[in-house]
Amino acid sequence: MNVLSVNDLHLDYGSGASTNQILKGVSMHLQRGEVVALLGPSGSGKTTLLRAVAGLESPRAGTIDIGERRVFDGDRKLELPAEERNLGLVFQSYALWPHKTVFDNVAYGLKLRKMPAREIEPKVNLVLAQLGLGHLGARFPHQLSGGQQQRVAIARALVYNPPVILLDEPLSNLDAKLREEARAFLRELIVRLGLSALMVTHDQAEAMAISDRILLLNNGKIEQQGTPQQMYETPDTLFTAEFMGSNNRLPGKVLRRDGNRVRLLVEGAQLDGTARGANVGSDVTALVRLEEVRVSDTAADNALQMELITCMYLGDRWECLFGRGDAKLRAYSSRRLDGGSYWLQMPAEKLWAF
């Protein structure tokens, strides 16, 4: 069952000649117990879509349904305000009241709904306990770590049991190490409580770790959608392939094609690859993920011979940069490589020609 449905949503800023189309006919749904990530570069429309669902932006056309209740209909000029949509919101800045305790921050939405005090206290205490905040109810936001403040913001969004929780870059204010820990906590929380969530992020690793399904937006439209594994392993377009991972781009030309298998000419060498819309005789962009490239000291099949330029230490591995003519290629190595020439081997099924 869908707890959120968006159909053919259009949203513009400005008017007349200065109109800027932000959403260009976006349709999506969210099922009960599902987490959908809105992923894309800055300006792609992902935050605008989330804000339109929340009732903080006014679309021009389309419909938005929360469960079986229509909250926006462009044709009927129907638009319920944000406070009547009963959605949980977690903002990028957390937006906690600095003069209120953790307990009062979480209870604030219930007080606005005129809930009796005797019902508020057990609800707040329950959600604080669920998020590991039970012992911090009397503290103020400035007395908390960044990760604790984030959990208070989530508790405030969950306390009145909304049908959908909306997360706008929920981890972006945390440092790199804390982000990884918070990512695992958020996914565990979502699974444990069976939440239905729509999350905006520009971080593809975060989207793949937390969500069940990803919607990749590009210039106001959905470029591709699918499970994290589908998006990463079977991208439909060059935009999707480049956004979902660490990649090498190589200029190439298609010499021949047999089904999806193609023979490519890359920097004077012939390589086998997999077609993603490439035609014989056409210039293409060949793309391969860094982790798929194998470095060899000796000649190897389906490989480019390249000169080592430099190696960078990443802790658990080295990232090495190689060059040949105008082409550059990066690959991982378990050790620091000595200068010289190497063969960079690429599996045909993982060398995609767009």
Image (tube, rainbow, N blue to C red):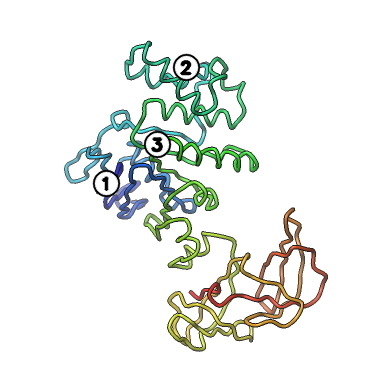
Q: Residue furthest left?
A: 76
Quarter in which the N terminus is drawn: top left
**Who's the residue at 50% across and 24% down the image?**
129
Mark 3 crowd level (few <14, some 14–19, many ≥20, 10 Å Cα): many
Nearest to N terminus: mark 3 or mark 2: 2
The total of numbered circles placed on residues is 3
- Where 241 falls versus 96 (above or below)? below
Secondary element at image label 2: helix
Separation of marks 3 and 2 at Cα, in angstroms = 20 Å
For residue 340, which quarter of the picture? Answer: bottom right
Secondary element at image label 3: strand
Q: Give percent across and percent down for residue 123.
A: 41, 20
Q: Of the residues shown, which amino acid type is indicated by label 1? A: Arg
Lateral position of residue 243 relative to residue 74, left or right: right
Q: Nearer the viewer, mark 3 or mark 1?
A: 3
Q: Give percent across and percent down for residue 201.
A: 49, 46
Nearest to N terminus: mark 3 or mark 1: 1
Question: Which labelled disc corresponds to residue 60?
Answer: 1
Question: Which labelled disc corresponds to residue 165?
Answer: 3
Question: Which labelled disc corresponds to residue 327?
Answer: none
Question: Which labelled disc corresponds to residue 104?
Answer: 2
Q: Residue furthest right?
A: 338
Separation of marks 2 and 1 at Cα, in angstroms = 37 Å
Nearest to N terminus: mark 2 or mark 1: 1
Residues marked 3 and 1 touching at CB (< 8 Å): no
Q: Of the residues shown, which amino acid type is indicated by label 2? A: Asp
Q: Residue furthest front?
A: 192
- Where 278 falls versus 104 (above or below)? below
Q: Nearer the viewer, residue 303 or 281?
A: 303
